[in-house]
Amino acid sequence: MINEQLHRLIGELSSYGIIVSFNGSFTQGIIEEIGTAITSYLQEEKNTEETDIHNVFSVYIEQSQNIKNYFLKSDGPDKHEISRRAFESIIVIGRQTDRFFVCSGNLVSHEDAKVLKEKIDYINSMDKDQLKKYYKEKLKARRSDSNYDSAGLGIIDMARKATAPLDYMFVSRDEKYAFFTLKVSL
């Protein structure tokens, strides 16, 4: 039974253009190993520009770090539940025609979902020049204030690299958590 399901799954992943997929608990070691494998794979692939390799790698790192950070952010009585649900994280990298995409999914609290939605909607409302200016403003603010919360710089940077608006979705899982997906087309 599992063999048939795996066979069907690989066919489905291929039909969506997915070339790399990982789901599970994201540790720093796993993030680094997958990053190395992605870079090697893309360097071996014909007609892959160095800029594309850099952008895919950068967006992969940002999204996987975000997954890890949301997991680490959970503390207190919910830590055990979050630890059990850490395996509900996924990242996929694929190619559709001549462009790449990086898509991730993980659990976030409903409070975090609200903040993320506002940030992404705001960032998606900007053109490339506005994004560049906004990114520089955020960097400058971070440098001048040691207590500055730099959360959001990664989302801005992903949007700057993207060829389309950031595509996201939240699916409520229960009263505390939603499953957040983010797709960045490069």
Image (cartoon, grey):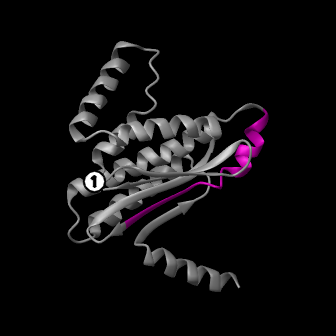
The amino acid at mark 1 is Thr
Disc 1 element? loop
Tell whether position 106 is magenta: no
The residue drawn where x is 79% and y is 34% is 77
- Residue 167, compared with residue 45, is above or below; it is above
Q: What crowding class fits label 1: few (fewer than 14 Cα within 10 Å), some (14-19), or many (20 or more)? A: some
Above or below 181: residue 92: below
Q: In the image as oriented, which residue stretches furthest toward the right?
A: 77
For image coordinates 68% across by 45% down, the residue present is 177
Quarter of the image for the C terminus: give it: bottom left
Which x, y percent locates residue 40?
34, 62
Q: Position of residue 16 (x, y in %)?
A: 43, 73
15 to the left or right of 79: left
Quarter of the image with the N terminus in it = bottom right
Q: In which image quadrant can residue 71 be found? A: top right
Can residue 90 be found in the magenta stretch? yes
Q: Which residue is drawn at 35% across and 44% down?
A: 158
From the image, tell me which residue sits under label 1: 163
**On the picture, is 46 further left or further right than 76?**
left
Image position, residue 35 (x, y; %): 41, 54
Query: Looking at this view, is 109 or 66 the one in front?
Result: 109
- Whole-percent x and y of residue 105? 54, 54
Q: In this view, does 147 lie above or below 18?
A: above
Q: In this view, does 57 lie to the left or right of 51?
A: right
Report the magenta residues as a range. Answer: 77-94
For this orientation, the residue located farthest to the front is 125
